[in-house]
Amino acid sequence: MSETLYKVLDFSRPIGRQSFREVISELDGHSPSHKKSALSEGQLKTLIAAIFTYGLHYDEVPKEQRELLLKAILEDKQPLFDLSQTFGRHLMNNLGNSAKLQLEALKNIEYDFKRPLSNEPLVDFVEMELLDQTTSYRKWEYGRFSVVYMAAHLSKHVGWESMEKTVKEKKLFPEGYLKSLGKELENARYGLDAHEQLLLHLIVKAKLWPKKTTMADYLLAGSITQQHILGLSLRSEKLAKALVNAMERTPNINKRRGGPKL
């Protein structure tokens, strides 16, 4: 069986942060359909990031809700959609030479910003150069990026620094703490779905014990995020509060060693 060799994504390169709405504002002086013969690099990448995000998640949304999904992405209505758009921008920063030439050529094509999915050259580029790798050999990287992004998103509520200090000072065993946390998250008082419990558990594991977090963990996190990002975004405040309460109720004292290590 042949192996695919590739470079792990380099996230250190700077990316643009221009939103789709900001691009539309810039193009307001053009035709009613917001067509423009030549795009700046930033405008093009913003359009591609939006198409990428829709393409990554639309299969997980019922057909009758897909128009609302696209609208939410374009209007920045849900905070976690930025997760996938940001990952897409990093993918564009790591393209191979052939794909870079394609991207450069795409700047000279006329696009309809009001109907992003009608731009077939861009849709084809996104499918071939961005989505294919994200849903296959880079799925674990998407998962790893997701848990890092969501840990940062939850940091407004979760005291990660305090917990990291506790882990270090008390030398907490990950297997014991994570098992107790998992049981606590299952409690009906939090009203969490199974995939939400699992994702929060993975976020805590990756944040507090990154060396214990495996590629399989990241693959699972990537699958959950891809399938449930809309619901996760809608319930992000609830998830944050549930995690804070669950961590407060989880004992942070080591018990006798035993059982398999994580």
Image (tube, rainbow, N blue to C red):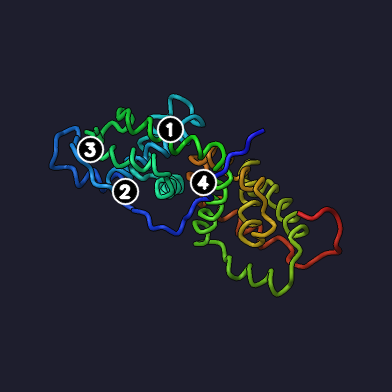
Mark sitting earlier along the chain (4/2): 2
Q: Amino acid at mark 1?
A: Glu
Q: Amino acid at mark 2?
A: Ser
**Callout 3–callout 4 Cβ contact below 8 Å:** no
Instruction: Mark 2: give few (<14), some (14-19) or many (20+) Cα within 10 Å.
Output: many
Could you say where residue 46 lies in the image, as x and y percent from the top left? Answer: 32, 45
Mark 1 sits on what residue?
A: 127
Give me the residue at 68% from left, 46% from top. Answer: 188
Could you say where residue 21 lies in the image, as x and y percent from the top left? Answer: 28, 45
Give me the residue at 52% from left, 44% from top. Answer: 232
- The label on residue 19 is 2
Q: Amino acid at mark 4?
A: Arg
Residue 53 or 99: which is nearer the viewer?
99
Label 2 to label 1: alpha-carbon separation: 21 Å
Q: How many marks?
A: 4
Mark sitting earlier along the chain (1/4): 1
Q: Amino acid at mark 3?
A: Asn
Mark 4 sits on what residue?
A: 235
Residue depth check, mark 4 versus mark 2: number of the one nearer the observer: 2
Q: Secondary structure at mark 1?
A: helix
**Callout 3–callout 2 Cβ contact below 8 Å:** no
Residue depth check, mark 1 versus mark 3: number of the one nearer the observer: 3
Q: Secondary structure at mark 2?
A: loop
Q: Secondary structure at mark 3?
A: loop
Mark 3 sits on what residue?
A: 108
